[in-house]
Image (cartoon, rainbow, N blue to C red):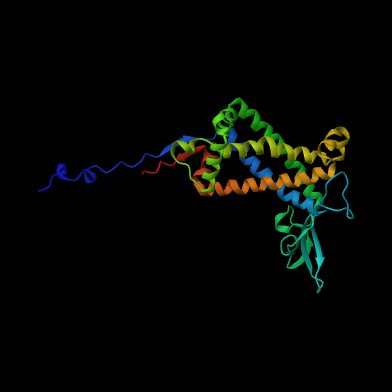
Amino acid sequence: MTTMDDRPESVAASPPKPVRERIYRHTLPTRITHWVNVLCILVLLLSGLQIFNAHPRLYWGQYGANFDRPVIAIETQADASGQPTGVTRVGSLAFNTTGFLGASDYDGHRQGRGFPGWLTLPSSRDLATGRNYHFFFAWLLVSNGLAYLFISFIARHIQRDLSLRREELSIKHLASDIWAHIKLHVPRGEESKRYNTVQKLAYLAVIFGLIPLMVLTGLTMSPAVDAAFPVLVDLFGGRQSARTIHFLVASSIVVFVAVHLFEIFLVGAWNEIRSMITGWYEVKPEKRT
């Protein structure tokens, strides 16, 4: 007869199940300003493409018109049958982008327009409404961003969670962190409770680089602002240069959002989204070796 003590140790003492740990990750002001930012950036992108469609060409310098040479252009041409085709030009390079850029289907037929209707706000050609959306949500983004910065500095969120330590700036550490992202490494345990170096650099670049640059270049395109602060025109090398930078910065923010969403789904979408709604985050236990 075999007793409990006679069984092998591996059978008698099975390892305990890891305890699920929950931490309060995001404060209420952080969650509110985050979701307001999501709404603002979405509306600004869609309405901005509506505005861009009014003249889908980008120039460098002070002037830009139909007969000037653009650095980037989304054009509509007619094929042999008279149907519109889309051609996107970047410098001297040309790409056929029919079906998306330059010519897309709308209301059952193909028409020439820079970006397709499903990517603009409103979806029909309405520059005035697009501008109204764009200007309103631009100021809402600025107000919300200033509120976020004020609250974050008072609560020491930026100083505590986003500031870079000296060792994080070493080439070896940066290379290791970038390689971990390339390998799609999923942080667990204590590692998941803090931002890694790549995350910090990305958030700092958006908060203190891309968004301020987008706001300043947007203001530079306003004749009234140019008259009051002509230094902005000189700073960006002309209103058309500011428009081009504005478009490229907006595109960079889109890339940031796309990578951000990919990372969310990689590490666990429900856990991440829930933490940005309720504030509570479930820490994944370390893998046993």
Above or below residue 199? Residue 53 is below
Residue 245 visible somewhere in the drawing: yes
Q: Residue furthest top?
A: 154
Residue at the image position 77 percent from the left and 42 percent from the top: 135
Q: How many marks?
A: 0
The C terminus, quarter of image: top left
Q: Residue furthest front?
A: 172
Q: Nearer the viewer, residue 114 or 26?
A: 114
On the image, the x and y values in percent for residue 270 come to 50, 47
> Is residue 155 found left or right of 78 in the rendered image?
left
Residue at the image position 57 percent from the left and 39 percent from the top: 199
Q: Nearer the viewer, residue 238 or 214?
A: 238
Residue at the image position 17 percent from the left and 45 percent from the top: 7
Quadrant in the picture for residue 160: top right
Residue at the image position 62 percent from the left and 41 percent from the top: 35
Above or below residue 75? Residue 49 is above
On the image, the x and y values in percent for residue 265 come to 53, 49
Q: Nearer the viewer, residue 114 or 178?
A: 178
On the image, the x and y values in percent for residue 42 come to 67, 47
On the image, the x and y values in percent for residue 118 come to 70, 57
Q: Residue furthest bottom?
A: 81
Above or below residue 172? Residue 69 is below
Residue 196 visible somewhere in the drawing: no
> Is residue 36 found left or right of 57 in the rendered image?
left
Quadrant in the picture for residue 146: top right
